[in-house]
Amino acid sequence: MVLDPYVQTNGNVMLKVTQINVGKLGVPVDYVMSYVANNYKLPDMVQVNTKQRMIVLRLNQLKLGNGLRMRADRIDLMHDEIDITGYTVKPAK
């Protein structure tokens, strides 16, 4: 699977699917994405949009231990750099 990653303003990661191969054989992106979306139970934080060929990793919905959350700040694969910030949310009073 060939993906182009983008960081959204809310810290989520959007992956644009450009190509899917099985070995050297290219397979239809729309078909494979639709099959996966309809036949596999994905975590709630993973959203598959087959029409736009997008996979969104909703990091803002991921809750780690001790109330820690995370957001993506920057992804630069050309320079092997991925910046992610961990933070906590104060409980509402």
Image: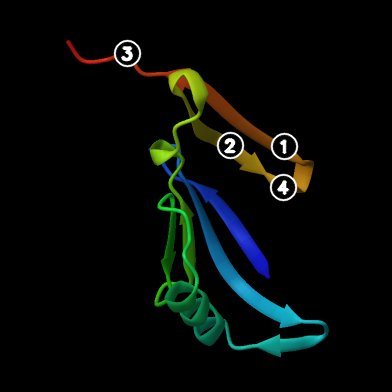
Q: Which mark is residue 74?
A: 2
**Which is nearer the N-term, disc 4 or disc 3?**
4
User: In percent of the image, x 46 and y 80: which residue is there?
Assistant: 34
Q: Which mark is residue 81?
A: 1
Q: Nearer the viewer, residue 46 or 56?
A: 46
Q: Are marks 4 and 3 in contact (CB under 8 Å)?
A: no
**Which is nearer the N-term, disc 3 or disc 2?**
2
Q: Are marks 1 and 4 in contact (CB under 8 Å)?
A: yes
Callout 2 amino acid: Arg
Residue linked to disc 3: 90
Q: Position of residue 73 (x, y in %)?
A: 53, 33
Callout 4 amino acid: Leu
SS at circle 4: helix
Quarter-of-image position of residue 82:
top right
**Which is nearer the N-term, disc 2 or disc 1?**
2
Q: Is residue 9 visible?
A: no
Distance from label 4 to label 2 (Cα)? 10 Å
Distance from label 3 to label 2 (Cα)? 24 Å
Q: Nearer the viewer, residue 73 or 86?
A: 86
Distance from label 2 to label 1 (Cα)? 8 Å
* Front disc: 3 or 2: 3
**Which is nearer the N-term, disc 1 or disc 3?**
1
Callout 3 amino acid: Lys
Q: Are marks 2 and 1 in contact (CB under 8 Å)?
A: yes
* Front disc: 1 or 3: 3
Q: Position of residue 12 (x, y in %)?
A: 45, 43
